[in-house]
Structures are given as C-alpha cells and as structure tokens.
Amino acid sequence: MTRVHDLNAVTTAIGEPSTPRLRLQRRGSPYGLLDGGWWPRSTNPVAELPGLILALDHLQGPVIRILLHRSDWTHQPVRLGLAGRVIRVAYFDSHPAGLLSAFTGASARGRIDLVVVPPETTFERADAAMTVAATQGNDLQAQDILDRLTRPDGGPGSGFGTQGG
C-alpha cells in the first residue's frame, strides 16, 4: 500500500511551544562547523520545532525552512504553521544524522547548523555536547559529537565524561 501525503497540508502544534534547550555560538564568533546544539525533549517535530523556531527567529531572524535527517524523527510534516506563517520542513536520508539546518531570511549567513542531541541523553552529556557544538572555532561535525555521546566514557579527550566536561 502506498501512503499519499498532502504536500499542501499545514500542521500546527496545539498548545504553547516549549522553551528549547539550546546553546548557540555568540554572534560574530569565528566560523565553526556548527552554530550550536539543541536537545529536544522528544522525536516529534510538531512538539519540538515551534519553540526552537521562535527562539531562532528572535536570535537570528525569521526561519523559513528546516532540513532534518529522516530517521531522527517519528513524524515528518512538511509544512509547519507557526506565528502566522508556514515554515517548510524537509527530511532527507542524505542529510547528516543528528544535524538540523535552519535557513533564515535575515541572517547574514542565512543558515544555522545545530547538532541535535537525542532526547534520551543524560543532562551531563547533553550539556557537554551542546557546549562543544557552540564553542568558537569548533571543528567537529554533528555526527562526531554524537558518536562521542555513545562511548561509555565519552571517549578520550571528548569532554563527555560523567563530570560534564
């Protein structure tokens, strides 16, 4: 059986958006591979994306599109209604796992790349991962940061040990 999705359907979250657990580099920081990290509470984009989008709107300018890795999310709505507008959301197997790319209309770079820390991650490890991702001049890709999360000791020199860093 083939499932047909209405690509014009707009999905809107019910209730107030949650405050995102988010850490970003300071504006004007030297370019790194990532702009920061985000630790959602679930893998449901309808529940998680509105709070993040509103925070990024405030800090970086209006978000107009988001790219995600398909298998990181339980649902895949392609148009998200929020604050009187529609944000396009695309899911690709080819987009790196654990990476969210947000495109804005006002940012000088126009793109924000965040490592997406899995919801089940402990506070200490999530905090360390977001700190590394938001560090000025960070040269680790999202998957490298996430790979360190899965090591029992956090990996040598990773800053992901039980002390948080």
Image (cartoon, grey):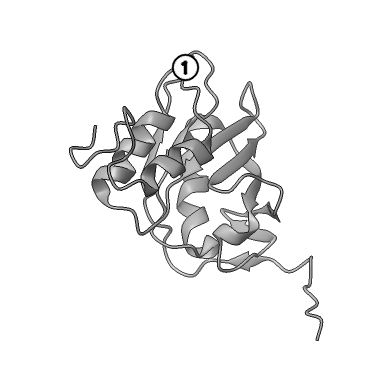
Whole-percent x and y of residue 80? 63, 59
Whole-percent x and y of residue 87? 66, 51
Whole-percent x and y of residue 15? 43, 67
Q: Quadrant of the C terminus?
A: top left
Pick the front one: 18 or 117: 117
Relative to 70, residue 28 above or below: above
The amino acid marked with disc number 1 is Gly
Q: Is residue 26 left or right of residue 105?
A: left
Relative to 162, residue 6 above or below: below
Neighbor class of circle 1 (other Cα within 10 Å; few <14, some 14-19, many 20+) is: some
Q: Is residue 88 left or right of residue 122?
A: right
Pick the front one: 155 or 79: 155
Q: Is residue 146 left or right of residue 6?
A: left
Picture residue at 55% right of the left edge, 25% below the top: 33
Picture residue at 63% right of the left edge, 31% below the top: 111
Relative to 54, residue 76 above or below: below
The part of the image, by quadrant, that contains residue 124 is top left
Whole-percent x and y of residue 17? 43, 58
Q: Quadrant of the N terminus?
A: bottom right
Helix, strand or loop at mark 1: loop
Q: Is residue 57 visible?
A: no
Q: Is residue 111 visible?
A: yes
- Identify the residue under disc 1: 137
Residue found at the far bottom of this picture? 1
Picture residue at 56% right of the left edge, 53% below the top: 83
Pick the front one: 129 or 148: 148
